[in-house]
Image (cartoon, grey):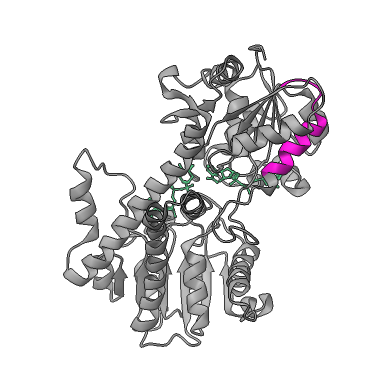
Amino acid sequence: MSSKKVTNICCLGAGYVGGPTMAVIAQKCPHIKVNVIDLNKERIALWNESDLGKLPIYEPGLDDVVSEARGRNLFFSTDIERHILEADMIFISVNTPTKTYGVGRGMASDLKYVELCARQIASIATSDKIIVEKSTLPVRTAEAIKTILDATGKEGVRFQVLSNPEFLAEGTAIEDLHFPDRVLIGGEEDQDGQNAIQALVEIYANWVSRERIVTTRVWSSELSKLTANAFLAQRVSSINAISALCEKTGADVKEVAYAIGQDSRIGSKFLKASVGFGGSCFQKDILNLVYLCRHFNLPEVADYWQQVVKINDYQKERFAKNIISTLFNTISDKKIAFLGWAFKKDTNDTRESAAIYVADELLQDGGIIHVYDPKVSADQIHSDLEYLQRNRIEKSNDKLAFTIEDIKKRVFVHDSPYNALTNAHAIAILTEWDEFKTYDWINIYNKMIKPAFVFDGRDMVSKKEMEKIGFKVYSIGK
Ligand code: NAD
Ligand code: UDX
């Protein structure tokens, strides 16, 4: 395969990664036509909305990037066939959730969407293509993709498969894409592989300095993505484990995190104790890593990483149980107000959010939950709770404890925080939205049932100041 200049890119998957990533490539490379394709027609329609407030995902700065490039060299479409045919390079950016069935259920990544992409590409392509894995995938998936492409592709059409994992974090996706710490590209060691790597390097080099573009073998690249997420999550679980010890000993986890973070060997990032990490990546990628280790008969390594997820489950459960025990051991029919539902601030994504687990635990004890989140809809919140239950029930062969109708009678979602908080027995802060810091807490206190409890899962309020107002405050790690 010769080193051809790329002028037409197609991306399969217009989600949290495919959408922003392709929008930035189009913004920075006006000479390249970028087509983002999805099977989901509604999602594509929202990407094409003239009202940029209706884009399917919320990310600060995304609307500006989309408005600059859309219609110029950035297009969103469902026409898979046409855009695969035209493309020199095809990114696969589809979802790779944890498998919920069969072999590897609850642990391995479900690669059915990736496999479908490979089969679609093979059946449509009539010219050579560079395929780029943008989805997070287990080690050696590139090999599987290549096997499918070579076995089912048209005669004489050649494929190169690169691994180019995405490291953006939600809420800061545009900033992360504009100024990445590094871009990682893995490819085959032969000349064709190196030519393909070079073609992708040239795209990123339009705005990323070449020292920050790291090239490796394909399997190292695939494994680096899982490892990076495992290390980041491990830091959060480590500080969360210490937060439990702080609560028993009178140490303050914020002070401990600051003190250890000053050591340049440790560093200060990802040491913020919380109600537990969420998001679509950390848990899924660690479980996948654990599965791989077990598959390769490395039980000690698997157990080591599994513990990161266990501590995270422990932290979420500890937070919920503390609410119940503090409210005199029952929350039956008590109003608990949730500030925040998203898994972190500045995103409307709720996948694996700690709020879902905390709410589920409180519902089982008879609590009534009133939620305010600036970006998450009521439908999303109700379906998150139903989905969690279904998952749990599939594992235990139990009956659904709450139908979606039951959930709607016990979980209320508000457009205004003050409606959610009025007459509440307790407030649980689950997401670190900046606006929570600006609230009129004296007014809120006056509207609550006494004693008025605040359970701060995100270190958002000053315990001292809130206690002065009259609140009873629980803060993680204090
Ligand atoms: P997502 O669910 O938001 O988007 C995936 C999209 O792919 C969906 O809209 C789905 O309809 C579409 N799709 C599925 N099969 C398709 C097909 N055959 N053709 C066209 N479209 C198809 O997922 P996401 O959060 O964007 O994650 C995508 C991948 O990126 C995952 O592997 C994830 O682990 C990885 N990743 C995610 C993040 C993140 O912050 N969300 C960060 C880094 C890496
Ligand atoms: C993560 C990785 O950071 C990113 O590189 C990868 O591409 C995708 O997965 P994301 O899940 O979007 O990104 O957000 P991140 O900022 O990593 O936060 C994940 C979770 O950890 C959130 O729930 C966050 O609140 C929590 N967290 C993070 C903490 O509780 N404490 C911290 O110090 C940092």
Query: Where does residue 273 sit, x and y in percent of width and height?
Result: 32, 58
As drawn, is 171 to the left or to the right of 463?
A: right
> Does the rendering let one see residue 126?
yes
Query: Where does residue 141 sit, x and y in percent of width and height?
Result: 60, 39
From the image, which quarter does the N terminus lie in? top right
Say which of 309 and 384 sits in front.
Answer: 309
Which quarter of the picture shows residue 324?
bottom left
* Magenta extent: 114-128
Say which of 182 and 286 sits in front.
Answer: 286
Q: Is residue 22 magenta?
A: no
Q: Residue at x 82, y 26 (%)?
A: 154
Q: Residue at x 62, y 58 (%)?
A: 103
Say which of 27 and 159 sits in front.
Answer: 159
Q: Is residue 124 magenta?
A: yes
As drawn, is 468 to the left or to the right of 122?
A: left
As drawn, is 140 to the left or to the right of 308?
A: right
Judged by its main secondary structure, the magenta piece is helix
Q: Please say if 409 is above or below 379.
A: below
Q: Residue at x 65, y 61 (%)?
A: 102
From the image, which quarter does the C terminus lie in? bottom left
